[in-house]
Amino acid sequence: MSHHLPDTKIPAPCIVNAGIIVNKLDMKRLLADLGRVRYIYTQEGKLQSEGEGDVIEVFANPKRSTLVANSSLYLNVASFDYLELKQSPQKETFFDLIQEGTCLRLMPLSTPIQERRERTWNVSAIEAMMEEVLAARWDAEIDDDCGDAF
């Protein structure tokens, strides 16, 4: 006797502000937008470390480590069993990366929109500085060319 399950399609989960994410790609997508964060690292409920830092890289590689040092976070989603998305009573979102008895809690200090604005501003500022440097260089070259005529 053959038992076949019906051919029903289960829709992909829809998680809004709270839930558990086990898919590594979804975890990467959520964490990739983080910029500056406050982090708390606990083992068996005991505080091990806390501080602030910038999320530099988010990746999934079972042969590499998650690293938190020098105010920089390199997050390997393969280091964790799941990500729990939560909200504080003040409606601020935070992320708990869970692996057995350990938890790396990340609390964003900026939003993705703020991060994009900051990056855009930085690019604009660099472009403006480069224009000034090039203009000054061209002025210096013109002055040198004019000085050679005498």
Image: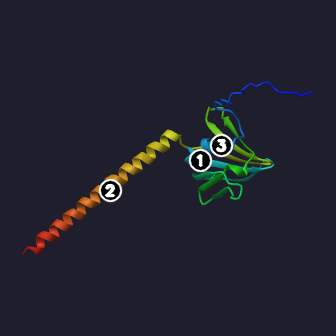
User: Of callouts 2 and 3, which one flags the residue occurring earlier in the amino acid sequence?
Assistant: 3
**Residue at the (34%, 53%) spot, across then down:** 127
Q: At label 2, which amino acid type do we have? A: Met
**Residue 145, which numbered label?**
none
Real-space Cα distance between discs 2 and 3?
37 Å
Q: In which quadrant of the rendered image does the N terminus lie?
A: top right
- Spot occupied by residue 80 in the image (x, y as percentages of width and height): 73, 48
Q: At label 3, which amino acid type do we have? A: Met
Q: In this figure, which residue is indicated by the disc labeled 1? A: 37
**Residue at the (67%, 37%) spot, across then down:** 85
Of labels 1 and 3, the one closer to you: 3
Q: In which quadrant of the rendered image does the C terminus lie?
A: bottom left
- Spot occupied by residue 132 in the image (x, y as percentages of width and height): 27, 57
**Residue 27, which numbered label?**
3
- Spot occupied by residue 149 in the image (x, y as percentages of width and height): 8, 73
Binning the other alpha carbons within 10 Å of mark 1 as few (below 14), some (14 to 19) or many (20 upward) gives: many
Tell me, yes or no, whether the two marked residues, 1 and 3, touch with CB atoms within 8 Å.
no
For mark 2, give the secondary structure: helix
User: Of callouts 1 and 2, which one flags the residue occurring earlier in the amino acid sequence?
Assistant: 1
